[in-house]
Image (cartoon, helix red, strand yellow):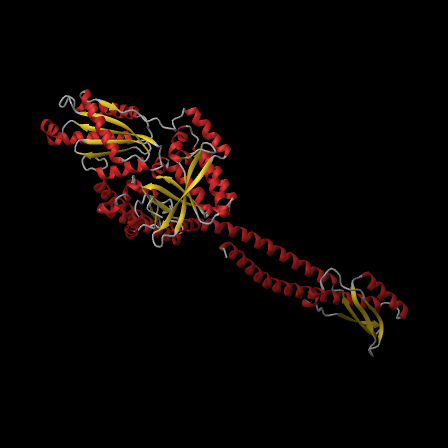
């Protein structure tokens, strides 16, 4: 029961007791007063009437007329004259009933006023004794009216007291509501701090909870910093700051074989002329500075380019994958321009022949070894062209190459014409290999007989044309319809361009509110890149769908682990770790340690951790031992 209800009950009880006590005292006092007044009135009227009768001749008719006149003119219950021997000479009695006052009230508060008595003389002799009693109607009416007024004032007083008390309790307990909200947020893994209230009792509670939240955040930040240091040590080249060979090749394999991006892209390699020559001409310190600057330029080329990755393959060989640029000429020219403008001018005076750039196209499921061989050939051709040159191989003629306007019409028609489909991939638990949920991946059917295009073949163009929001909303509708006839849960991928669209978030909330039974079976996940690029929009998405019962997670988690402390107050339900950390996990002790620490931190915050891109069934026991709660990929049956 709420405090306000308890307050009203307490006020009602207190006012009832107060009214009862006041009524008893007031009624008894008023009754006593009225009895005294009636007694005085009876005595006065009896004396006056007796005096008047004493002066009259003692004719019975005259006496009776005088008594009748007095009885009819006043408000009397009884007027009686009895002889000295006790015989009733004259009597008038009021035979009407009392009105306007409840009988139960009359029974509870009887008025017993003493009658007035006086002697009626006949000269020097006693004619008789006059007894007179006034009516009690008006006394009871006055007593009843006073009781009603007292009740009214008590009711009004109780209502006013209750209203004021309610207002005061709401003011006093408003900080308590904030404390409850903070506790609920912590239970939902959202670690929020609130301002300390003025109430001393609540202030100490809030101070303790804020302290706990800060300790949890500090623990998360410290552990995240430790794991980020470990991640960089294991996966990054210490000098250039780029991905090391193994990690880069794992990333490239995911880009080439996965469906997150288009079926075609470009690989651009940069080869320094000779590290020995650089060390001889520049010395070790300046040569290291050259490599660090090169690493920054290559890393900068990946900023704001979705999925683009850079790495150091060995010694003086570096590579950048352009998953959204199918033209190697365009990709090679972009990187060559960056190098000649932002890096070469600082070193060309000392090393005129510094580098070559080779760019080659790739297509989905191409062998990575074959791709690297083709890139080596492109570098050889660039070297043949001269110093600091660039060579780009010919782009493959892809079946999905279409003008932008054609893509716009195609995607618009797909949303309106029901040409979007869902493909499902199982996500299983580590303990018993039972399905945790299914991941619903979008497909585009170009025609009734055509193959289904994976999301990577058309979603980049949809993002370019600002069409991701209607597509993703249609995907949610497809998932809801699927859930109506199929048990289990479905995870839906939302793009960064979609979550930033306010209209999408509003329409999504309306759609979910119209289907409340489906909310607990729907999971929404956003790629890590999109989460940190549109962090405020992602926060708004979380706050919009989680209260409805949906779960929210991050896909491809781990590339920007250093920024993970931003997630502490969101209440995430799960994360899906980037496949580049999972590939070859059996032969990578460093990543094993990193992932074990990641799973431990996530478990402390109640976050489910799922491994993406599991290649072999043999990796499942190892991943389970590292702390993963779920797995998905080609190795999951």
Q: Who's the residue at 42% across and 34% down the image?
A: 451
- Residue 434 is left or right of residue 104, and the answer is left
Q: Position of residue 478 (x, y in %)?
A: 48, 40
Give the camera-side residue of 202 and 362: 362
Give the camera-side residue of 514 and 66: 514
Corner quadrant of residue 452: top left
Q: Position of residue 441 (x, y in %)?
A: 41, 40
Give the camera-side residue of 436 and 66: 436
Q: Position of residue 562 (x, y in %)?
A: 28, 40
Location of residue 108 with respect to 411 vertically, above or below: below
Q: Position of residue 406 (x, y in %)?
A: 44, 25
Location of residue 163 with respect to 106 vertically, above or below: above
The total of numbered circles placed on residues is 0
Q: Who's the residue at 54% across and 51% down the image?
A: 163
- Residue 597 is left or right of residue 124, and the answer is left
Q: Is residue 634 visible?
A: yes
Extreme-front residue of the structure: 449
- Residue 141 is left or right of residue 214, and the answer is right
Extreme-left residue of the structure: 280
Q: Is residue 211 visible?
A: no
Corner quadrant of residue 527: top left
Location of residue 335 with respect to 42 vertically, above or below: above
Give the camera-side residue of 76 and 304: 304
Q: Who's the residue at 88% across and 65% down the image?
A: 65
């Amino acid at each position: 029961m709420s405090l306000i209800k308890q307050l009203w009950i307490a006020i009602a009880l207190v006012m009832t007791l107060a009214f009862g006590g006041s009524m008893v005292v007031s009624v008894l006092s008023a009754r006593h007063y009225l009895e005294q007044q009636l007694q005085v009135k009876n005595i006065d009227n009896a004396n006056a009437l007796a005096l008047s009768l004493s002066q009259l001749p003692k004719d019975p008719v005259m006496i009776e007329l005088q008594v009748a006149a007095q009885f009819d003119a006043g408000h009397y219950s009884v007027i009686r004259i009895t002889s000295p021997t006790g015989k009733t000479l004259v009597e008038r009695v009021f035979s009407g009933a009392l009105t306007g006052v409840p009988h139960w009230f009359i029974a509870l508060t009887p008025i017993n006023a003493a009658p007035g008595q006086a002697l009626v003389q006949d000269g020097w002799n006693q004619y008789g004794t006059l007894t007179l009693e006034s009516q009690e109607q008006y006394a009871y009416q006055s007593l009843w009216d006073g009781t009603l007024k007292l009740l009214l004032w008590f009711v009004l007083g109780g209502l006013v007291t209750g209203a004021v008390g309610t207002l005061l309790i709401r003011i006093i307990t408003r900080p308590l509501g904030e404390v409850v909200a903070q506790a609920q947020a912590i239970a939902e893994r959202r670690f929020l701090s609130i301002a300390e209230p003025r109430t001393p009792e609540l202030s100490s509670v809030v101070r303790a909870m804020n302290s706990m939240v800060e300790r949890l955040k500090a623990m998360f930040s410290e552990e995240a910093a430790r794991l980020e240091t470990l991640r960089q040590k294991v996966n990054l080249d210490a000098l250039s700051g780029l991905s090391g060979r193994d990690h880069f090749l794992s990333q490239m394999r995911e880009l080439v074989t996965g469906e997150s991006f288009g079926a075609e892209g470009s690989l651009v390699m940069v080869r320094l002329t000779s590290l020995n020559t650089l060390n001889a001409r520049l010395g070790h310190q300046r040569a290291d500075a050259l490599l660090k600057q090169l690493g920054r330029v290559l890393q900068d080329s990946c900023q704001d380019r979705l999925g683009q990755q850079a790495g150091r393959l060995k010694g003086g060989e570096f590579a950048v994958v352009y998953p959204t640029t199918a033209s190697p000429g365009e990709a090679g020219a972009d990187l060559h321009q960056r190098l000649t403008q932002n890096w070469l001018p600082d070193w060309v005076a000392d090393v005129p022949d510094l580098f070559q750039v080779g760019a080659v196209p790739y297509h989905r499921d191409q062998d990575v070894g074959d791709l690297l061989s083709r890139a080596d050939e492109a570098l050889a051709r660039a070297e043949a062209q001269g110093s600091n040159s660039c060579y780009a191989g010919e782009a493959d003629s892809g079946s999905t190459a279409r003008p932008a306007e054609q893509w716009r019409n195609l995607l618009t028609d797909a949303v309106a014409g029901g040409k979007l489909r869902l493909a499902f991939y199982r996500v299983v638990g580590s303990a018993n290999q039972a399905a945790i949920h299914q991941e619903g991946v979008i497909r585009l059917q170009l025609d009734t007989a055509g193959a289904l295009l994976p999301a990577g073949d058309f979603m980049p163009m949809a993002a370019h044309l600002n069409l991701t929001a209607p597509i993703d909303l249609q995907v949610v509708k497809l998932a809801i319809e699927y859930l109506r006839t199929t048990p289990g849960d479905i995870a839906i991928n939302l793009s960064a361009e979609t979550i930033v669209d306010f209209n999408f978030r509003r329409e999504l909330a309306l759609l979910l509110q119209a289907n409340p039974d489906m909310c607990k079976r729907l999971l929404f996940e956003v790629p890590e890149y999109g989460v940190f690029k549109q962090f405020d929009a992602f926060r708004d998405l979380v706050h919009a769908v989680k209260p409805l019962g949906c779960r929210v997670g991050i896909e491809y988690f781990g590339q920007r682990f250093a920024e993970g402390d931003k997630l502490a107050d969101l209440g995430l339900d799960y994360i899906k770790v980037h496949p580049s950390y999972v590939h070859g996990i059996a032969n990578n002790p460093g990543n094993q340690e990193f992932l074990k620490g990641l799973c431990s931190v996530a478990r402390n915050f109640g976050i489910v951790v799922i491994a993406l891109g599991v290649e072999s069934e043999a990796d499942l026991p190892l991943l389970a031992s590292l702390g993963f709660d779920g797995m998905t990929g080609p190795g999951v049956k």
